[in-house]
Structures are given as structure tokens and as C-alpha cells.
């Protein structure tokens, strides 16, 4: 199966993230998880899972994560 | 014109376009006058909910670029100290008028001059100085009001005009300087007027980094040194051949002046050294006199506050004698003449000798 | 990413915020509130006309984050300072951004009187029911039973008095045209907060009067909760003392703006 192009994607600023995990709370596609490797400040930053496996929902670019992110650490993109 | 009104009219002519204040005797005529006069020139008058709100309103209005004034009397000045300290730290100009009254606490409404410490020794927290101008009559009130706004803008500092209840009420003829046209006012490159075509500005006094705070304080001190070097003002009256010099400011100086006339008529050689800037205090000029005369007499409408600056200036170079009357009692010229005679005679009958 | 050209950015840093890491704690409501304020200023094209007054509190350094002119005010005096600014420059957009101690303890008089005079100022009131910057002391809005370092064992009505509802008190003032209380503790409420802030800004632009948006704000550090738990505490506990919704609205604006 070829990789289908997701409707949206996000870019998380790893060093700006403080690991509050609120984005993970609200992502409807559950595409965000905590990275095991810490950033320079010692937080476990949020990490976006861009690769959509079989049966999974892709990112829709709903921007709910960015809406709740206190650090404006998330940029959201939608497919044209 | 009445003293309080003189300040108001002079302020408007000097370009003041924002006043906030709270009623307190004996200066209510000033806000009352400005409540009618400021709208005539498109300015803003606010009777604020307190002296605290007033000083903060002028802080904001000044940061936005206006020439600003607030006024009060002694207990109200106590409330303004926080705002004055912030204005000093933020380098925001403004003119604060204190028509002094009896204290401490609520005191009374009679003329007293017991806010010298409060005005010249900070009053608020931190290492800062506030230029303090002490006029001695209505004409000088008018001229000094103009100077106050200039000083404030030139050095970006709050400035205090120190009057008293008597001066506020007295009526004397005044010739006002011409009004300054708005476009002749100094341009300010630091104000907050919206960041169009420039980076945003922030005005603040909190500097958490201790190196930067250290440097900021040095910068402020360098400014105060410049003010001391260039803006110190005083007046000598009949001091050339004086054997005794009396040091007094404000209303006390007017009384001393009359006392000196009386004494001169009797052949006694007394002179008046009248500080006009209480900070910066004219230390060096006074010290120069102390080397020439034997006796320096200090007269204040207080228990002795400027006295300390005289001691600092004179030291042991001359005898220092003090006569102070607190609480709003205003001695007559005859009383002061008696004091000076007692100083001359060295009999200790009026006032007391200070051991420096 | 090679497919960059196939996507367009729909969410990023607002112009009215500096691209700058903040010192706020993980999950702090301030960061979200800052962004919402910035988004609204951007939407209304106000950044270059705005002069803001931050509080003394955790947001005391807000001028390092907001990308417009700002002036520090002594604790509680922001609305007096803002009054001076707005009266001298009525064509500018003036806002204050204050916490519960700043607005409803030491600044109560300045707050009430600026509101009562109907000053054309918009105020964002961040209510986290605690004194954050100084380490967790009781705030005027600390709720009964809530623990604080100066109310050990929890706020007790007899010992410490009751929490204050300044927004409802201000609603009595005729100079106040709009007050709404929202929260920063759920997606839905964050969106509602943004709408409320926009409406408050519009009140100033239309010259209607004083407006205030109170935002119940999570404080994970001083509440000793995780960010997710802090959201829960606002949504389940704090709103019982501070119910959400419109407290006053005489703007005449319809539901949709």
C-alpha cells in the first residue's frame, strides 16, 4: 500500500515545548506522544507521528493541539 | 492671583495637558482651577479616586507623551511615594506639587514645612533623587512651574514643587511667561505612542539581572550628578557684608527677608541665603559663606530638616544656630529678628546652637 | 519536508507575540491567554496602535513576550496608568492584562473606578485563584477549602474571609458594558475565551465603555497538579465558585461577531 497524503500535518518546536501534554489530550487522531529523549531544558517534548499506518487516522489539520498549546510551539499545515 | 491658581495657569502655559489629583486642604483651588482651564486648551483633568490613582494616572499619561502634573498636600504626598519611585526608576517625567501642611499623620491644615525630608530624601524606595524646587512667592511660583516642566523633560525625572498652605492662599500680582506653543515642546523619542514603523518599546523599572540593575543605578546617579552640577539654584540677599547669614526657604525665607530689613535698619549686618533647589542643595555656595561668616542661623517651619543639609554643608566652619517652629505656627518677622539678635549676641535666648 | 509546497500554514505564531520562549510553567494559562490576546490584536489590525499595561505577578515580564508598546505599573495600579495613557492618546488601543492580586486585591480601587468611569480600556483578568509569582499564597479569589501557603489547611471563611467575585461587583457600574467569564481549561472554553476577548476589544473600538474578560486559568505549579489535572480542577471545582458565562452585556452586539 502506498503512503496516503494526510490532510494535515503539524510541526512541533521541540525546544519550545515544555512537555505539558495538553496537545495529546485533545488530538482526535492521537498522533502526538511524548518523546523519550529530553530537550535542552529537560522536558520530554511532544512529538508528532507523521507516518500513517494501515487503519490509522491521519492528521486532519484540525489545529486543536495548537489551540491548547501554551507555548505556541505547534505550527499547523493543511493540504492545499 | 492666588498662589494655587498661579501654579495651574503657569502649568497650562508651560504645556501641561494632563492633571490628575484628589482634593486635600490647602491646595484645592489648584485642581478646581484646572478642572475649568484644562478643557479650554484641549487638555484632560481627572479628579481621581485617590492620590495613589492620581500619581499612577500621570505616570501613564507622561509615558504616552504629555506634560503632566499632580498636586496634593503632605499626607497625600506620602501616598504618592510609590509612584514617584517608579517614575524615577522608569525615567518618566512629571511635576508633583506639594502645598505642605502640619504633620505628622493627618496633622492640620496650617502652613508648615515639615516635608523637606520626604521630598529630598527619596520618600519612596531605592537609590534615586528628586529635584525639589522651593519658590518663595507667587511670581516665583509661576516661573518655577515653567522650570519644573523643563527640568522634568530634560532629565526624564519627576520634579517636586514645594509650597505651603500660606503660599497657596496668598494673592500677589504675577506676570506669566508666554505660553509655549505645542510644537515648541521638546520632542520625546522614548514615549509610548504605538509601534508604527519601529520596534515596540517597553518602559519598566524592574531589572532582575543584577549587573544590568547595577548599571541602571549608575546611569541614574550620573544623571543626578549632572543635575547637581547644572541646576542648583539659590539666592543671596544682602550677604556681601553680612556677619550673620540666615538660611531659609519658601515662606520662611519671606519672613526672614522682612526680619533682615528690620535689622539692617538698626545697623545689624544680616543676610539671607535662600536655597531654591532643595535637592540639589546648594552645598558648595553655602560652604563658601561658612568660611567667611562666624554664624549661620537656620530658620525652618519644622523641627529641623533642612538643618541637616546645612550641617553637612557647613560642618565646623561656622557656628550653626537653629530656630524651628512646627505645626503650622508662622512666626512674625519680629520673632525672626529676635532670633538673629540672639544669635549675634550668642545668648541662646531664642533658638539653640547646634553642635556639629 | 519535500511536500512543503503542497501544504499551507494555517496556524502559527501571531505577529503580536514575539517569537520568544516564555518563563511560564508547563501548562500555565498565561501562555494561552497571551496568544489569544495576540491573535485578536492581529485579527483587528491593532498591534501598531496598542499600548499595554502588564501586572505585577507571573506576567510582570509580559513586555518581553508581547510585540507592542508596554509600560510596567506598580502592583495593582495598571488601570490608573492605562487611564492616563488612554486619555492622552484616545486614538490608541489600550489594554491591561492583570492577575487576581493585581486587579482584585491591591488594585481594587483603581479597578472599580476605571470601570465605573467607563474608561475605554479592555482588561484581561487572569484568575488562577492563587498568588503564583510569590510562591502560592492565598489570593482574593482562592476558593473555600483551597490550600494556600498563607491559608494552611485551606481557606476558611471565618479566618480568611470569602473569595471575592470582582466581575459581578463591576457589573453594577454603568460605565461597564461587557464582562464575561471564560476558562483556559478546555478546547471549547479556550475558543470561547478568544471570542470574548475579541468582543471586549471591539467594545473599545466602538467607544462603548469599559469591558473585562475574566479567564479562569490553570496553575499546575501552585495547585500542585499536572497540567491535565489542573484543567480538571478548573472545570469541576473552580467553576462552582466562579461560574462561566456572560456576566454583563449591554453592547447590543449579536451572538456572532
Image (cartoon, grey):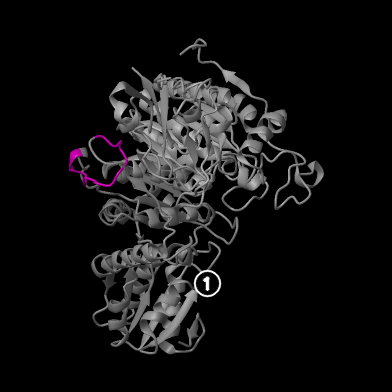
Residue at 49% across / 21% down in the picture?
A: C195
Residue C80 colored in magenta in the image: no
Residue C197 visible, this orientation: yes
Split into 4 quadrants, where in the image is the N terminus of chain B? top left
Chain assignment, label 1: B
Query: Which residue is more in the foreground, C230 or B222?
Result: C230
The x and y percentages for residue C252 are 50, 11
Examine the rendered structure and indicate whether residue A19 appears above or below residue B129. above
Q: Is residue B184 magenta?
A: yes
Say which element carries label 1. loop
- View extreme (top): residue: C254
Residue C103, given in percent of the width and then of the height, sits at 56, 39
Q: Is residue B240 left or right of residue B353?
A: left
Q: Which residue is mark 1?
A: B303
In magenta, the rendered stretch is B183-196
Query: Percent x, y for residue B114?
Result: 50, 64
Q: Position of residue C70 (x, y in %)?
A: 38, 42
User: Which image quadrant is residue C4 in?
Assistant: top left
Amino acid at each position: 500500500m502506498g503512503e496516503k497524503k494526510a490532510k494535515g500535518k503539524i510541526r512541533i518546536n521541540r525546544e519550545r515545548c515544555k512537555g505539558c501534554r495538553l496537545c495529546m489530550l485533545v488530538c482526535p487522531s492521537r498522533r502526538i506522544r511524548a518523546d523519550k529523549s529530553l530537550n535542552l531544558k529537560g522536558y520530554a517534548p511532544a512529538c508528532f507521528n507523521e507516518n500513517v499506518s494501515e487503519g490509522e487516522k491521519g492528521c486532519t489539520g484540525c489545529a486543536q493541539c495548537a489551540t491548547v498549546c501554551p507555548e505556541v510551539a505547534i505550527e499547523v499545515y493543511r493540504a492545499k | 492671583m492666588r498662589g494655587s491658581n498661579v501654579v495651574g495657569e503657569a502649568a497650562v502655559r508651560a504645556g501641561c495637558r494632563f492633571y490628575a489629583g484628589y482634593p486635600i486642604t490647602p491646595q484645592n483651588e489648584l485642581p478646581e482651577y484646572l478642572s475649568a482651564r484644562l478643557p479650554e486648551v484641549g487638555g484632560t483633568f481627572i479628579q481621581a479616586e485617590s492620590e495613589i490613582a492620581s500619581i499612577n494616572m500621570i505616570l501613564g499619561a507622561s509615558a504616552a507623551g504629555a506634560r503632566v502634573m499632580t498636586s496634593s498636600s503632605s499626607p497625600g504626598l506620602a501616598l504618592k511615594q510609590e509612584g514617584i519611585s517608579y517614575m524615577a526608576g522608569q525615567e518618566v517625567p512629571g511635576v508633583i506639587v506639594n502645598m505642605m501642611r502640619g504633620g505628622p499623620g493627618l496633622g492640620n491644615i496650617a502652613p508648615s514645612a515639615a516635608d523637606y525630608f520626604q521630598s529630598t530624601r527619596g520618600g519612596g524606595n531605592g537609590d534615586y533623587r528628586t529635584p525639589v524646587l522651593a519658590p518663595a512667592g507667587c511670581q516665583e511660583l509661576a516661573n518655577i512651574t515653567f522650570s519644573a516642566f523643563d527640568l522634568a523633560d530634560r532629565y526624564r525625572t519627576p520634579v517636586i514643587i514645594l509650597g505651603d498652605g500660606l503660599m497657596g492662599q496668598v494673592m500677589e500680582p504675577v506676570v506669566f511667561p508666554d505660553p509655549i506653543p505645542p510644537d515648541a515642546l521638546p520632542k520625546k523619542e522614548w514615549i509610548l505612542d504605538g509601534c508604527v514603523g519601529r520596534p515596540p518599546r517597553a518602559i519598566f523599572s524592574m531589572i532582575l539581572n543584577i549587573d544590568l540593575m547595577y548599571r541602571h543605578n549608575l546611569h541614574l546617579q550620573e544623571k543626578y550628578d549632572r543635575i547637581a552640577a547644572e541646576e542648583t539654584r539659590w539666592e543671596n540677599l544682602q550677604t556681601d557684608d553680612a556677619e550673620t547669614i540666615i538660611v531659609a526657604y519658601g515662606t520662611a525665607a519671606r519672613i526672614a527677608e522682612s526680619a533682615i530689613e528690620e535689622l539692617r535698619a538698626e545697623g545689624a549686618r544680616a543676610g539671607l541665603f535662600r536655597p531654591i533647589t532643595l535637592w540639589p542643595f546648594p552645598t558648595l555656595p553655602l560652604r563658601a559663606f561658612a568660611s567667611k561668616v562666624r554664624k549661620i542661623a537656620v530658620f525652618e517651619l519644622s523641627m529641623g530638616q533642612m538643618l541637616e543639609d546645612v550641617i553637612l554643608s557647613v560642618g565646623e566652619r561656622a557656628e550653626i544656630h537653629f530656630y524651628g517652629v512646627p505645626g503650622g505656627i508662622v512666626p512674625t518677622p519680629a520673632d525672626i529678628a529676635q532670633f538673629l539678635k540672639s544669635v549675634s549676641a550668642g545668648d541662646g535666648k531664642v533658638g539653640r546652637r547646634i553642635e556639629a | 519536508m519535500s511536500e512543503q509546497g503542497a501544504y499551507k500554514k494555517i496556524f502559527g505564531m501571531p505577529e503580536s507575540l514575539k517569537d520568544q520562549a516564555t518563563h511560564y510553567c508547563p501548562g500555565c494559562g498565561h501562555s494561552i491567554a497571551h496568544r489569544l490576546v495576540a491573535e485578536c490584536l492581529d485579527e483587528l489590525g491593532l498591534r501598531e496602535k496598542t499600548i499595554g499595561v502588564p501586572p505585577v505577578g507571573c506576567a510582570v515580564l509580559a513586555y518581553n513576550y508581547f510585540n507592542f508598546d508596554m509600560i510596567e505599573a506598580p502592583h495593582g495600579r495598571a488601570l490608573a496608568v492605562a487611564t492616563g495613557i488612554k486619555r492622552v492618546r484616545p486614538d490608541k488601543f489600550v489594554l491591561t492584562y492583570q492577575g487576581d492580586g493585581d486587579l482584585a486585591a491591591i488594585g481594587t480601587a483603581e479597578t472599580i473606578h476605571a470601570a465605573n468611569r467607563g474608561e475605554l480600556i479592555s482588561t484581561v483578568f487572569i484568575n488562577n485563584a492563587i498568588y503564583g509569582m510569590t510562591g502560592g499564597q492565598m489570593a482574593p479569589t482562592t476558593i473555600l477549602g483551597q490550600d494556600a501557603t498563607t491559608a494552611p489547611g485551606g481557606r476558611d471563611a471565618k479566618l480568611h474571609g470569602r473569595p471575592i467575585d470582582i466581575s459581578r461587583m463591576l457589573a453594577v457600574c454603568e460605565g461597564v458594558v461587557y464582562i464575561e467569564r471564560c476558562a483556559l481549561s478546555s478546547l471549547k472554553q479556550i475558543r470561547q475565551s478568544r471570542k470574548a476577548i475579541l468582543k471586549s476589544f471591539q467594545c473599545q473600538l466602538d467607544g462603548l465603555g469599559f469591558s473585562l474578560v475574566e479567564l479562569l486559568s490553570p496553575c499546575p505549579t501552585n495547585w500542585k497538579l499536572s497540567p491535565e489535572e489542573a484543567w480538571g480542577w478548573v472545570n469541576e471545582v473552580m467553576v462552582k465558585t466562579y461560574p462561566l458565562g456572560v456576566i454583563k452585556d449591554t453592547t447590543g452586539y449579536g451572538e456572532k461577531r
